[in-house]
Structures are given as C-alpha cells and as structure tokens.
Image (cartoon, rainbow, N blue to C red):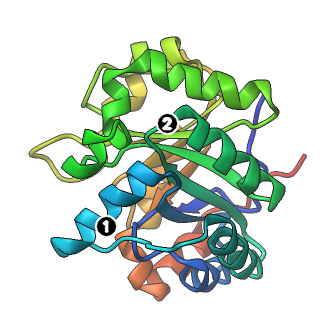
C-alpha cells in the first residue's frame, strides 16, 4: 500500500449532514477518536440548492453563504480535539470538487468525496450516490484532484453497484465503505471479501457499535467508522479504550 491516513487511533466519526459541525466533531474527537468528519457539505450552487430543498421537507443540512468562512471556522474548532479532520463534500460539478478540495487541504484537512448520499434532490444534480452510475465522472474527479496534489477518500455504500468495478475503474487510494445490505441489519462483511484483492486504505462503516464489531472490521479494513452511536459518548469512549492505538511507524 503506497498511501495511508496517519490516524492516532483507527476510529472515524462518519459524516452526518446537518449534525457534524465543528463543535460536535470537537466533542467526539476529544474522546480519542482518530478522525472526525465534518458534513456532508454542499460546495457548489446546485448542490446547495438541493440542500435547501431537503431542509424545506424537514431534513437537516448545513446552509451557509460563504464556503470559505464556514470551512475555516468549523475545521479550526474540530481540529482543537487533536483528531485528524476530514470534510465530506457534495458537488454537481468537477470544478466544485476541485475548488473546495484545495480549500480543505489548505486548511489542513482530508477530503472525502460523497458518493453515498441517496436523497433524490442531491442525486438529481449529479451528486451523491448518482456518481456510482457515472464511474467515469467519479474517476475524472479523483484524477483531477490527484493531479493537483489532493488524495481524496471516496465514501460510498456497498451492495448498490458491484464494488470491484468501482475500485478498478476509479482507482482510489482510499475508500470509506458503508457495508450496507438492504433489508438486513449489521455489518455486511461480504462487501470487503469481494474487494480483498484491491489494495488501498479502507475504512469500514455500518452498525459499528461495540468493540467486538470494531475489532472484526479491523480484520478487513485499516480503520472503522461510526455515526449514530456518537450520541452515546460512553460507548464511543469504550470503543477507543478497547481498540489498540494505530502504529505511527
């Protein structure tokens, strides 16, 4: 493996749109988590319009007028925890991803491309999970970023499209995969069995709520992530305390 995220601990707070702002990420990071994720955040005009439509029907989203100010303030606050900070972004254009990604990297954070959101409004503008139906576009986004010195994480949901072609077409150096299977609860380890031959940095997500599940995820991934359990600070602390620290060698 030629690329790795240097995390102090193999735990990641996954994105929750409208919830994971700087203060929330700081509070979780202070529990010893390796990386916290701001967002999801819409970074261009069309994706922000989609966010506003989603808010109108009752979903939580981050709405702001100035992307630079929003990112600068929230990344600074999240980074006070000592955790690595990533920012989960959505855009309707390649230029939107590139501009936001350089801003995020300049502020000392990791970029996460959101190919995961399946809200209709976001998919209609070509963002979120719709990227899995346009792998050449997703590859273009990754290639454009890597050509200018940004190595992004790609966040997507398993069992939506065959995972091996996603990886072999897009060629990401780091992925954050929601090991989801419709109609079932819990972590679907078969997602990672199907991509075991693909070498990249892997974060496994879905129903990681206990040290036992986290340990099993780390048998097939480099790190694990969690989301809703974040409301239970004692449970997050138990995950951190039970799992060995990441080697920094």
Query: How far is the residue under mark 2 from the one under mark 1?
Result: 18 Å
Q: Quadrant of the N terminus?
A: top right
Q: Is residue 178 left or right of residue 245?
A: left
Q: Is residue 70 left or right of residue 48?
A: right
Picture layout, residue 196 above or below residue 210? above
The residue under the point 80% across, 30% down is 148
- Name which of mark 2 and mark 1 comes first in the sequence: 1
Q: Is residue 9 left or right of residue 182?
A: right
**For mark 2, what is the residue?**
93
Q: Position of residue 13 (x, y in %)?
A: 53, 65
Do we see residue 246 in this rendering?
Answer: no
| Name of the residue lying farthest toward the left | 183
Where disc 1 sits, the SS reads helix
Where disc 2 sits, the SS reads loop
Question: For residue 73, which quarter of the picture?
Answer: bottom right
| Name of the residue lying farthest toward the right | 249
The residue under the point 54% across, 20% down is 139
Q: Nearer the viewer, residue 197 or 168?
A: 168
Q: Is residue 185 left or right of residue 224?
A: left
The residue under the point 9% across, 45% down is 183
**For mark 1, what is the residue?**
52
């Amino acid at each position: 493996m030629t690329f790795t995220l240097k995390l102090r601990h193999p735990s990641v707070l996954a994105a929750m749109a409208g919830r994971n702002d700087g203060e929330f990420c700081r509070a979780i990071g202070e529990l010893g988590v390796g990386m916290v994720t701001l967002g999801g955040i819409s970074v261009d005009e069309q994706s922000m319009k989609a966010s506003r439509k989603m808010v109108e029907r009752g979903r939580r989203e981050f709405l702001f007028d100035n992307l630079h100010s929003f990112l600068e303030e929230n990344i600074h606050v999240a980074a006070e925890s000592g955790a690595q900070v990533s920012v989960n972004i959505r855009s309707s254009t390649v230029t939107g991803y590139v501009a936001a990604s350089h801003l995020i990297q300049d502020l000392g954070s990791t970029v996460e491309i959101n190919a995961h959101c399946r809200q209709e409004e976001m998919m209609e503008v070509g963002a979120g999970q719709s990227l899995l139906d346009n792998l050449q576009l997703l590859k273009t986004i990754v290639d454009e970023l890597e050509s200018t010195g940004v190595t992004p994480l790609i966040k997507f949901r398993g069992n939506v499209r065959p995972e091996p072609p996603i990886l072999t077409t897009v060629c990401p150096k780091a992925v954050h995969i929601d090991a989801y299977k419709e109609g079932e609860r819990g972590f679907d380890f078969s997602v990672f069995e199907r991509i075991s031959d693909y070498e990249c940095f892997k974060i496994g997500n879905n129903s990681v709520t206990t040290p036992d599940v986290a340990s099993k995820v780390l048998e097939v991934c480099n790190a694990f992530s969690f989301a809703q359990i974040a409301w239970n600070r004692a449970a997050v602390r138990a995950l951190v305390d039970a799992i060995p620290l990441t080697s920094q060698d």
